[in-house]
């Protein structure tokens, strides 16, 4: 049985642009607890946790340390999947370094590592592992720039955004695209935890439904993955729903804290 883990939409969503993103993402640490919400014949239950650290890297870049652990219960059998991603992305959207390690029951299954560079016309990807190879994609947006520009488009009042996205997937030649639907969140919706709610008070937010497509997508137009989440104007997300097709996980912020911003950096464009 295949246990698919997708790089969560914590850091994703928008059309490619040659302009640097205007939204200034808040460096932060967040933890999300997830549980199974759809019925499936494959598992008795599923629970998971996502933990991420978004930090400023030398003013010109942002680094993301992301981990998604899920436990699949099948009668007397327990399978644990663990996806670990380290990435660095320049604020101008031109360079993306990535390394993703996937383990099942503590045994390493795969490592994908490389770098992608955007020029004016295309995205050039060089993989170091699992095998050294290079590929050229249509000009694509990287994950954190994707999030920043989705916020820009939401602030501008747009309600649907389509994108070409590269997120470090070894199957990059399948040409990942997304379609995002944006609706303003209701003003009365607040996180249940008072401390978390206090950190998000006064921030504008939107409810996002994002569908991911590639060459494996269903002929009837069904996406390979779909997610829903609440996106705040500082880049924090909450109220996650991750639909993998065979099963769906849902949950929200269990912990949130902000990192300080480095001094001496020029203002974001």
Image (tube, rainbow, N blue to C red):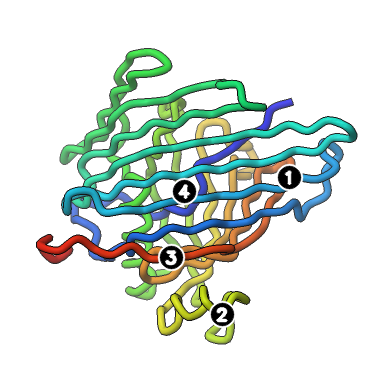
| Pointer 1 or 3: first along the chain | 1
Viewer-proximal residue among 130 and 258: 258
How far is the residue under mark 1 from the one under mark 3? Answer: 30 Å
- Which residue carries the number 1 mark? 247
Residue 104 is labelled as none
How far is the residue under mark 3 from the one under mark 2? Answer: 13 Å
How far is the residue under mark 3 from the one under mark 4? Answer: 29 Å
Q: Quadrant of the C terminus?
A: bottom left
Q: Helix or strand or loop: what does disc 3 sit on?
A: strand
Local packing at callout 3 (Cα closer than 10 Å; few below 14, some 14-19, many 20+) is some
Viewer-proximal residue among 206 and 257: 257
- Which residue carries the number 3 mark? 257
Local packing at callout 1 (Cα closer than 10 Å; few below 14, some 14-19, many 20+) is some
- Which residue carries the number 2 mark? 194
Q: Nearer the viewer, mark 1 or mark 3?
A: 3
Q: Is residue 21 visible?
A: yes
How far is the residue under mark 4 from the one under mark 2? Answer: 33 Å
Report which quarter residue 1 is drawn in.
top right
Residue 178 is labelled as 4
| Pointer 1 or 4: first along the chain | 4
| Pointer 2 or 1: first along the chain | 2
């Amino acid at each position: 049985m295949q246990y698919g883990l997708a790089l969560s939409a914590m850091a994703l969503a928008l059309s490619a642009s040659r302009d640097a993103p205007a939204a200034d993402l808040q460096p932060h640490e967040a933890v999300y607890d997830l549980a199974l919400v759809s019925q499936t014949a494959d598992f008795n239950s599923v629970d998971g946790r996502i933990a991420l650290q978004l930090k400023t890297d030398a003013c010109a870049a942002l680094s993301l340390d992301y981990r998604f652990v899920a436990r699949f219960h099948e009668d007397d059998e327990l399978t644990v999947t663990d996806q670990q991603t380290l990435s660095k992305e320049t604020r101008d959207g031109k360079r993306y370094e990535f390394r993703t390690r996937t383990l099942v029951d503590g045994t390493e299954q795969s490592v994908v590592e490389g770098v992608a560079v955007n020029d004016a016309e295309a995205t050039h990807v060089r993989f170091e592992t699992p095998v050294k190879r290079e590929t050229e994609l249509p000009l694509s947006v990287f994950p954190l720039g994707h999030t920043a520009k989705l916020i820009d488009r939401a602030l501008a009042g747009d309600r649907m955004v389509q994108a070409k996205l590269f997120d470090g997937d070894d199957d990059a030649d399948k040409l990942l695209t997304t379609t995002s639907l944006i609706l303003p969140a209701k003003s009365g919706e607040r996180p249940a935890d008072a401390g978390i709610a206090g950190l998000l008070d006064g921030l504008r937010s939107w409810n996002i439904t994002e569908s991911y497509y590639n060459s494996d997508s269903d002929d009837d137009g069904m996406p390979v993955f779909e997610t829903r989440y609440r996106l705040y104007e500082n880049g924090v997300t909450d109220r996650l729903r991750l639909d993998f097709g065979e099963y769906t996980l849902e949950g929200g912020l269990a912990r949130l804290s902000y990192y300080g911003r480095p001094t001496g950096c020029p203002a974001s464009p």
